[in-house]
């Protein structure tokens, strides 16, 4: 094919649009013709009619002159250079008519993709193990069950009331610990494992830790009395003797919490809530006999409700209402605790004590390399130093007369979801 010279810019008519706009694809690729062929008509886009007139000065005009018999390969470099200089926003009709103008919408801005934490890397680990916060269970949900968080003691719902269930795994041992044919003795169940008890269950001793042991029976009203003799104290021994309720912690000495009142051997002080106060003029030692007096006038009116023994899901539990469990006992008006040493009254130690069921209790301590610090209880009725005068106080009864109280297992457990479980 013969080389064809490209048309010079001087051959083009002086049109503003031709000077500004580069030739279109149709001008470069399609041969000029007087009438559009069917194939060209099919390729021509169907655009709305936009007349080019002076009334619409913004409409571009097409007076383009195309190069005849031009080599497409030779024209392509010129077209590429023209595209770099200006953008063509029009479409030329291959018939040579005026170009129709089409406005293109600007491209949408690129959207920012959210970066996921860690991406798609399977090796990344979360920075924290803390998971989503769990919704709080409803108030009637059973703690430790499927609807509770954190575990703990079960609290089945019983209508609008809630109960705190404390497992009673030692129920069989508690029943064997006391009975209607037995006198008042030291408990083999309600004691620290560090405390040793004699065969007759009246003598207790310990060298490891300052722990507690209490009697099998307690009282909630009236005036009562018992004695304790210090059998062995030693050079490093110490005791705290007195009264404690069934809520006292047996792994602590008597008087360490709000559920016990003790008489201390070292300096004769009194102890309540782990606070020592001046009481007697001097302490007591080996061979001394201590007397323990308590008076609770109408104390049954102030005693907190004792937990019921129920069977829940085949297991024994002590059930107590949450309101009763959280409420602090009211003090008993006119109540009093007095200590005696060898029959001599040491004065009033505590007054207006909280209501509750009080048990005789003792705590012993000595160094591990020395013999046990031992004390022996006497629940009556034959006392070594029974006071002849109580200075106008009610005359007490011996603790040996406290009646036996059997554990009653209720036939129904607390209702859960409206259904009570029958005990077998």
Image (cartoon, rainbow, N blue to C red):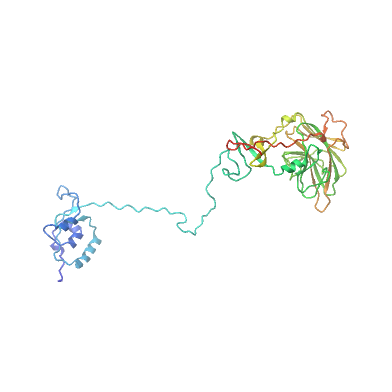
Tally of marks: 0
Residue placed most toward the observer, 343 or 206: 206
Q: Position of residue 418 (x, y in %)?
A: 58, 35
Residue at the far left: name it: 34
On the question of residue 261 being in view, the answer is yes
- Residue sitting at x 87%, y 30%: 389
Residue at the far bottom: name it: 2
133 lies left or right of 202: left
On the question of residue 249 being in view, the answer is no
Quarter holding residue 294: top right
Residue placed most toward the observer, 66 or 252: 252
Residue placed most toward the observer, 176 or 383: 176
- The image shows residue 177, relative to residue 20, as above or below, that is above
144 lies left or right of 176: left
Q: Position of residue 100 (x, y in %)?
A: 18, 53
- The image shows residue 42, relative to residue 211, as above or below, that is below
Q: Position of residue 25 (x, y in %)?
A: 20, 60
Quarter holding residue 270: top right
- Residue sitting at x 84%, y 51%: 371
Q: Position of residue 176 (x, y in %)?
A: 76, 42
* Quarter in which the C terminus is drawn: top right
* Quarter in which the N terminus is drawn: bottom left
């Amino acid at each position: 094919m013969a080389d064809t010279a490209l048309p010079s810019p001087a051959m083009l008519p002086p049109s503003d649009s031709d000077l500004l706009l580069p030739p279109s694809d149709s001008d470069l690729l399609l041969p000029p013709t007087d009438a559009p062929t069917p194939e060209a008509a099919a390729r021509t886009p169907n655009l709305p009619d936009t007349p080019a007139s002076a009334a619409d000065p913004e409409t571009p005009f097409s007076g383009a002159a195309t190069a005849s018999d031009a080599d497409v390969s030779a024209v392509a470099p010129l077209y590429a250079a023209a595209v770099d200089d200006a953008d063509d926003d029009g479409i030329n009709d291959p018939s040579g008519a005026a170009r129709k103008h089409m406005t293109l919408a600007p491209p949408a801005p690129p959207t920012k993709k959210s970066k996921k934490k860690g991406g798609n890397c399977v090796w990344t680990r979360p920075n924290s193990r803390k998971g989503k916060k769990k919704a709080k269970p409803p108030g009637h949900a059973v703690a430790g069950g499927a609807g509770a968080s954190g575990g703990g003691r079960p609290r089945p719902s019983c209508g609008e009331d809630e109960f705190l269930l404390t497992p009673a795994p030692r129920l069989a041992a508690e029943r064997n610990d006391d009975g209607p044919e037995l006198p008042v003795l030291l408990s083999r169940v309600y004691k620290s494992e560090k405390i040793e008890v004699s065969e007759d269950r009246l003598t207790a001793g310990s060298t490891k830790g300052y722990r507690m042991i209490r009697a099998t029976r307690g009282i909630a009203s009236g005036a009562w009395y018992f004695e304790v003799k210090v059998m062995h104290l030693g050079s490093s021994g110490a005791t705290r003797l007195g009264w404690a309720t069934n809520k006292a912690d047996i792994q602590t000495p008597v008087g360490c919490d709000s559920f016990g009142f003790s008489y201390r051997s070292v300096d004769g002080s009194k102890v309540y809530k782990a606070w020592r106060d001046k009481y007697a003029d001097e302490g007591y030692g080996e061979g001394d006999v201590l007397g323990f007096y308590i008076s609770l006038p109408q104390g049954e009116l102030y005693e907190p409700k004792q937990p019921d023994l129920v069977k829940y899901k085949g297991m024994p539990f002590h059930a107590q209402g949450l309101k009763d469990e959280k409420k602090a006992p009211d003090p008993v008006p006119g109540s009093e605790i007095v200590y005696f040493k060898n029959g001599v009254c040491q004065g009033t130690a505590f007054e207006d004590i909280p209501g509750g069921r009080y048990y005789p209790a003792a705590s012993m301590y000595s160094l591990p390399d020395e013999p046990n610090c031992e004390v022996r209880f006497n629940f009556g009725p034959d006392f070594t130093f029974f006071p002849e005068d109580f200075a106008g106080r009610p005359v007490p009864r011996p603790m040996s007369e406290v009646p036996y109280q059997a554990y009653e297992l209720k036939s129904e457990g607390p209702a859960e979801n409206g259904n009570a479980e029958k005990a077998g």
